[in-house]
């Protein structure tokens, strides 16, 4: 699948790591092995139907496969593999850290897209969204949330030092900024979903095409220590005027000093924007439960699916 | 566009209990034949990249073979998750041996 996308084909995919099931194809001839032995996005029923995951499939022989290519999945910037050297680290919250890499072979990406990081000593690559905006593609910055007992985040947080390198592959993903969409923008993030929302906010505030649009940045955590320092957004142009930050926490009992909003971001968005949600361009990233709640919200408010953008890699 | 009649295919092209994909302009449609009655909906699943004309049909229900969600062929309503957004359906019109929709 990645080979097809590198060649400019619209091979459908989303997560790149065996979870989402969007890259399934039918094997007509030949033999295939999956890289991940038991990928969550694949079932016994798929095996019976000779359907495999494009992102995990390694051909063992010449193969003939069947799938529908779709223009929607063609890459704006063809993904490529390179090496990134860690140039800086910054703590964003108690468990989110920004890692900045300089690329051996620069590669631009669209705001909201993600890359695959292959860390030394970790089997397989993991998908993380970039938080910066770049036209040269010389640097990719990632705000990564530490996963308890996570092999890759463990390697990044505990072992990787400035000057050391990781494998990078990308850019991937369809949840990138639609500059041609003349609508107000709603960004919804939680947990590990901060990074792409920051990239989108940075790009949207800088885009002349989107100058007339309001941008609502909703971000949720369990307690206030999950929330980032407001300067991450308040230094952007139009902050408070057209870029609005709406933080919320979901566990106020663990955070008695919190005086702000309590609840989930999708409920906060419904309360604040109501029927307007139908006419917004909505981007979101976060844990599965949040993605599900937001999808429900979109159905409830009848937001056209073409105005909704997210990549489900969990 | 409203009220415009679009020719899709001959009724003989769709066998009973099966579906075919028809592309007309910007429309990509799945045409189903259920016991001799014809139903038309958008072909691309509202949830993922699946093509519903290629999905297994069980009674009035079509299953998407990407994530195993399913829709009622007659109404477009979601039958099984993970799909949540109903499919857009079109009124099928048969004149002689030809199938049309109004769009």
Image: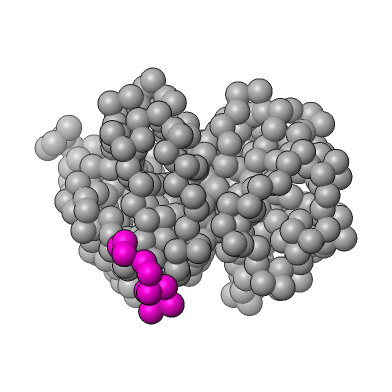
Which residue is at 38% across, 74% downward? A256
Q: At which x and y percent is residue A57?
A: 74, 57
Q: Please say which color scheme the image uses.
A: one colour
| Nearer to us in this view, A297 or B43 | A297
Indicate the quadrant containing the N terminus of chain B: top left, top right, bottom left or bottom right. top left
Which residue is at 41% across, 55% downward? A219
| Nearer to us in this view, B71 or A292 | A292
**Secondary structure that dominates the magenta span:** loop
| Nearer to us in this view, A59 or B31 | A59
| Nearer to us in this view, B26 or A2 | A2
Question: Is residue A304 rendered magenta in the image?
Answer: no
Q: At which x and y percent is residue A141?
A: 65, 40
Which residue is at 33% across, 24% downward? A211
- Image quadrant of residue B18? bottom left
Q: At which x and y percent is residue B15?
A: 39, 60
Question: Is residue A257 rendered magenta in the image?
Answer: yes
Q: Which residues are magenta?
A: A251-261
Q: Going by the image, does B100 lie left or right of A220?
A: left
């Amino acid at each position: 699948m990645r080979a097809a996308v590198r060649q400019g084909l619209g091979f459908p995919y989303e997560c790149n790591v065996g979870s989402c099931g969007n890259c399934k194809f039918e094997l007509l001839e030949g033999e295939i092995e999956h890289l991940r032995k038991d990928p969550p996005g694949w079932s016994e029923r798929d095996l019976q139907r000779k359907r495999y995951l494009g992102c995990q499939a390694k051909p063992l022989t010449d193969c003939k496969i069947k799938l529908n290519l779709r223009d929607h999945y063609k890459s704006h910037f063809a993904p490529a593999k390179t090496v990134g050297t860690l140039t800086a680290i910054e703590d964003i919250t108690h468990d989110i850290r920004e890692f900045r890499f300089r690329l051996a072979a620069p590669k631009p990406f669209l705001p909201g897209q993600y890359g695959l990081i292959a860390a030394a000593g970790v089997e397989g690559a993991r998908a993380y969204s970039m938080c910066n905006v770049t036209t040269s593609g010389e640097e990719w910055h990632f705000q990564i949330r530490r996963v308890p007992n996570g092999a890759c985040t463990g390697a990044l947080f505990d072992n990787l030092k400035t000057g050391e390198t990781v494998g990078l592959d990308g850019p991937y993903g369809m949840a990138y900024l639609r500059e041609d969409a003349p609508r107000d923008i709603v960004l919804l993030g939680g947990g590990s979903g901060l990074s792409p929302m920051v990239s989108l906010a940075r790009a949207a505030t800088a885009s002349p095409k989107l100058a007339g649009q309001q941008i609502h940045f909703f971000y949720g955590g369990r307690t206030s220590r999950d929330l980032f320092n407001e300067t991450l957004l308040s230094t952007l142009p139009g902050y408070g005027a057209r870029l609005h930050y709406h933080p919320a926490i979901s566990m106020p009992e663990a955070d008695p000093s919190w005086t702000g909003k309590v609840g989930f971001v999708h409920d906060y968005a419904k309360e604040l924007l109501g029927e307007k949600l139908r006419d917004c361009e909505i981007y979101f990233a976060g844990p599965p439960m949040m993605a599900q709640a937001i999808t429900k919200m979109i159905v409830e408010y009848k937001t056209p699916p073409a105005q909704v953008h997210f990549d489900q890699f969990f | 566009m409203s009220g415009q009649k679009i020719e899709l295919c001959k009724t003989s092209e769709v066998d009973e209990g099966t579906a075919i994909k028809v592309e007309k302009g910007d429309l990509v449609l799945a045409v189903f034949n259920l016991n001799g009655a014809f139903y038309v909906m958008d072909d691309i699943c509202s949830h993922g990249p699946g093509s519903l004309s290629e999905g297994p049909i069980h009674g009035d229900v079509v299953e998407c073979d990407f994530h195993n969600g399913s829709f009622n062929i007659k109404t477009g309503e979601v039958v099984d998750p993970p799909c949540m957004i109903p499919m857009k359906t079109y009124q099928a019109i048969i004149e002689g041996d030809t199938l049309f929709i109004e769009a």
